[in-house]
Amino acid sequence: MNKTQSIQIIEATLLDNGFKYIGPGPNDYSGALDVNGKQIDVKLSIPDVRFAEKPRVSLTDRSQIPLETLAHIDSGDGGICYISGAGLPLDMYQPGEAILRVLEEVKRTLGLSYKGRAQQEFIDEYQLYWRAKYGASIFLPRSSATGVVEASAFFAKRDGKTEFIAIRSSKNLSGYTLSFFAKAQIWSLSENIGPSEKIKVPLHYSELNDWLSSQKLATEMSWSKAEKLLLDEGLLILSAPNAVVGLQLEVPAHLKSAVARKRIRKGKLADLLLKSRKNLKLLRYSCSWCSLEDIASRNCLGSQTLKETSVALVGCGTIGGHLARMLVQSGVGSSGKLSLFDRDSLAEGNIGRHLLGFGDIGKNKALAVKAELERFHPDVQVYAHNGDAMTMWRRLKQHDIIIDATGEWNVQSAINDSFLSEDRGNVKALLHSWIFMNGAAVQSFLNLGDDYACFRCLKPDFAGQWRYPAGNEDEPLNLKPASCGDGAYVPFSVDVSTMAASLANKAVLDWAIGHPGPRLRTVVVDFQRGRTQKPVSPTPSKLCPACSHSRGSP
């Protein structure tokens, strides 16, 4: 359907429903909707008849709705937020029906207020209605317990330019220079915050006591404590299940200037502010929790993250680089540390499949990945070792799990042997991740040192076949031999590397929550060369040279 046909169908549909064209755009209309038995006038603008940009609907006259609290309405232009968080699919090939669906959603949204849901809807979206002038990022772990946390507000600067406001307990943030600008308190609440009987959002200092007293505060949260903090130019942050918002007094310009020129002593400012409290405005902040722990928990709702897990990642190449980032996004490095091991440097030919890019060519992979992870999140606890991991078992065994992402047979076999024969220290699991047969598939294998197979059990005979091959071992490309330099390069796309990393990350998450599931997992990438293998927990091989002797096999 072309654009002209869509416009004609939309126009016919709207005219048939009592709307009229008003312009100035080609699809701007006005009309009335029946909401709770009352006609409500609205304006409808359709900027895109393919609906990639949704139609805009706004109230023509706010006074037509005699409700004190009206949810989902922009107080500035009367725009109606009729689309839920799940979105609103509209069929561009049925433009008339799509527009009618928009109008029905608008009626439903307005009807919520008439049904007594306005207050609750308003509370649910209170952060949006707060209309903050500034933002602040909280780098402390969010607590489920109620209480008051003392912190500081800093300007986070890079190259002399302020990039954001950081709420922290210490003056350090990797990659940034922090300059203190205010004391801060975080009041963690168990109940939602919202409008009071008379005040939707406090705009002035004179309204704040009444608004605060209407919230369900803990006993240690008093007006006197809030007032003392604010008069000292501090930042008060209220963290509730529905919103995280901040408040600070807006010090009048003449008082700021007088303090700066030392005509007023800093210690006298609080008294002067208190005397002029009727005219003081409030600065409002929209705050967000952005500790590494909180970032990971958003993706793992209802399940355990890897925040307490310490991980040793051996190999920071095409698999390990992507896997390192995924592990951090899953919580590694927030409480438990992440240690990276790789002795090689990044080459030009690596960057087509690597997490790292051109600027890291020539750098040690472990060190460069560490720097990249610190750019991702400044609080990550990550350590890099640019030597041979196989000479560092003492360091490896200090972690909960060792992940071998080298994909190199000799390293895989050596780590497997150390896990079986050396003192394991803290190590509870060994995970291998590799690309099978030059990109035909990817596999991961988890070894818990129990009654199931070890890595070498998967291929007991060095010159023999894999027990669970993920590709045809006789296919020419699968058997392409390695050689020196670029002669050893086998072309396959970057998705192979990221699939291998994803498979390993999922295996670690499953293990961490106590449900390791099938130990050997396979994903076919090239369906011409790959071979599907169902997830399985292999039994030990009686011919395994690594573990058969310790299991009592001949």
Image (cartoon, rainbow, N blue to C red):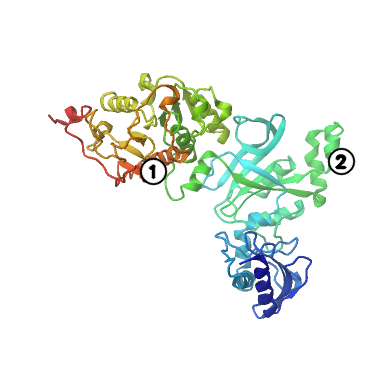
Q: Give the label on residue 549, or none.
A: none
Left or right of residue 171, residue 345 in this image: left
Labels 2 and 1 touching (C-beta < 8 A): no
Furthest-left residue in this view: 554
The answer to which of 86 and 356 lies nearer the viewer is 356
Eye-nearest disc, 2 or 1 = 1
Q: Label 1: few (<14), some or many (≥20) within 10 Å?
A: some
Residue 416 pos. (x, y %): 29, 28
The local secondary structure at tag 1 comes to loop
Q: Give the label on residue 254, or none.
A: 2
Determine the CA span between mark 2 and mark 1.
70 Å
Three-letter amino acid code at the position of disc 2? His
The local secondary structure at tag 2 comes to helix
> Can the viewer see residue 457?
yes
Three-letter amino acid code at the position of disc 1? Asp
Q: Report the residue marked by disc 1.
A: 526
- Tally of numbered tags: 2
Left or right of residue 114, residue 381 in this image: left
Residue 107 pos. (x, y %): 63, 72
The answer to which of 354 and 110 lies nearer the viewer is 354
